[in-house]
Image (spheres, grey):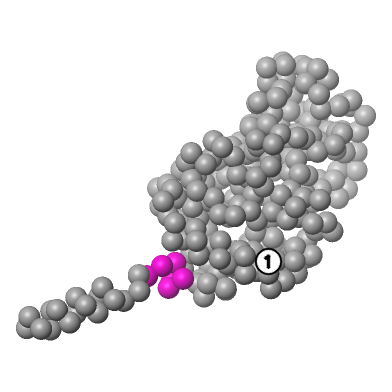
Amino acid sequence: MKRTLITLLVLACSSPVLTATAKEIRFGVDPGFAPYESKNSDGRLVGFDIDLGNAICAHLKAKCVWVEGGFDALIPSLQARKFDAILSAMNITEKREKQVSFTNKLYNGPTFLVARKNTLSSSLPEALKGKTLGVEQGSIQEMYALKHWQAAGVQIIPYQGTQNLLQDLEVGRLDGAVLSGVMADYSLLRKPQGADFAFVGSALKDDDLFAGGSAIAVRKNDDALKNELNGAIAAILADGTYKKLAGNYFSFDIYSGQ
């Protein structure tokens, strides 16, 4: 009996630890950010992040499970272990790094102020005084607007999701909106209702907020999963999978944001 127990203990200790690659990876996502993540007419999740996640899972021989939620609730839900990681166009920021750990960069898309043509002269604080701007609650765009414009007398209105934000912009309840340039292009400017709208000036600049790009967020100290994800990201960059997937959505280098 003792010999049997010792043998079992030795086998248990020598067996590899089960990681995400042994079963599934649950990604938290807010499907309101086309072309990164949205739902098609059949209600199926589609987009660049979805394709990247599926490619990462395929490399790791894991099953991808997508858990939907509001963007501002993704980090609390991750910490509550409702899923394993966040893959939802989340920018790396100093504030977020205090709450979660990030993988290596996935991409780096620009951010713009969007408004009806010929209504806003620039994105400088003095040009926006007294204006009302919409932002996605919990987003990097909200952080930028609060940091650079609120003190100058600009009213910043946060929205749960982008659908109502865009609707209010279109009907004139907002003077402008701060959006990912790619999302603004896909969700508004390329559509008939976006014909009267345009980017105001060039891409917004803030190295503290934007320089890190977007990545996958995992719980603090979840180094095993983070390392697996980083290995998979490096692999799909090296073997051309990333470039092929990005070409389905973008006409520029989304990895560098150029």
The residue sitting at 85% across, 46% down in the picture is: 189
Is 209 contained in the magenta span? no
Q: Position of residue 39 (x, y in %)?
A: 66, 58
Residue 85 in sight from this viewpoint: yes
Vertical comparison of 83 with 5: above or below: above
Q: Residue at x 68, y 50 (%)?
A: 33
Residue at the spot 53% in from the left edge and 72% down from the top edge: 60
Identity of the residue drawn at 44% across and 67% down: 20
In terms of image quadrants, where is residue 232?
bottom right
Q: Which residue is mark 1?
A: 237
Helix or strand or loop: what does disc 1 sit on?
A: helix
Can see residue 67? no
* 171, 88: nearer the viewer: 88
| Image position of 5 (left or right of 129) | left
Q: Is residue 7 above or below residue 141?
A: below
* Residue at the extreme left: 1
Q: Is residue 207 above or below residue 82?
A: above
* Residue 20 included in the magenta stretch of the image: yes
Out of 76 and 166, give the one closest to the viewer: 76
What is the quadrant of residue 223 in the picture?
bottom left
Q: Position of residue 247 (x, y in %)?
A: 79, 65
Instruction: From the viewer's side, name the closer residue of 197 and 40.
Output: 197
Placement of the N terminus among the 4 image quadrants: bottom left
Q: How many marks?
A: 1
Q: Position of residue 203 (x, y in %)?
A: 81, 38
- Amino acid of disc 1: Leu
Q: Which residues are magenta?
A: 18-23
| Mark 1 surroundings: few (<14), some (14-19) or many (≥20) residues within 10 A | some
